[in-house]
Amino acid sequence: MYKHVFTILIVFSSINAIYSQNRAIQGKVIYDNYNDFDPIPYADIIINDSIKIGRTGMDGCFQFETSLPVNKLTISSVGVEDADLIISDNCNNIELIMISLPHRCFMSLRKINKERRKIYKNLPRLHKEAYEKGIFQSPYACYIQEFYEWR
């Protein structure tokens, strides 16, 4: 009888330990400044559209630990577009190139969106270039960053 009770207690405690583990996410945030790849200091990091979890350091790096499920990560800073990233459970190292805000006076939104779309399509090449320069640890991003047109 005691063996069965003890076995059930072990099973429940191991299930509880599995589901209550913290997830550690780290990363680096840069922007393409004429192929110079400068870090973005003090960028805000928000998870699931609601919880500000921290900021990047002076070197553009960040690290946080959370017990909450993280499906979406938003990174924002002054002078660059907000980056909304959809991340999977196995994506724990976020390496991101942010896009500078366009300074195009007297241009239509259609033309600005067209230029922004070109930049977004170029991001995988820039990511690989940052990897080749030793800035990133992986040649490919483990997240999905969708393009949203400005309206």
Image (tube, rainbow, N blue to C red):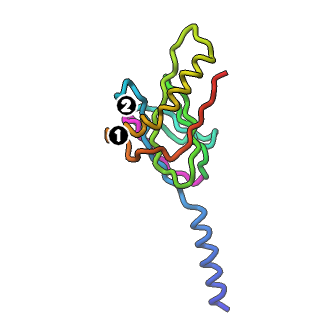
- Earlier in the chain: of badge 2 and badge 1, it is 2
Q: Label for residue 37?
A: 2
Question: With respect to residue 74, does 19 lie above or below?
Answer: below
**What is the crowding at mark 2: few (fewer than 14 residues within 10 Å), some, or many (at least 20)?**
some
On the rendered image, what quadrant is the C terminus found in? top right
The residue positioned 40% from the left and 36% from the top of the image is 60
Mark linked to residue 60: none
User: What kind of residue is marked 1?
Assistant: Ile
Q: Are marks 2 and 1 in contact (CB under 8 Å)?
A: yes
Magenta residues, start to end? 58-68
Q: Is residue 23 visible?
A: yes
> From the viewer's perspective, is residue 106 above or below residue 82?
above
Residue drawn at the location 48% of the way across and 47% of the way down = 64
88 to the left or right of 55: right
Q: Is residue 68 above or below residue 85?
A: below
Q: Position of residue 137 (x, y in %)?
A: 38, 46
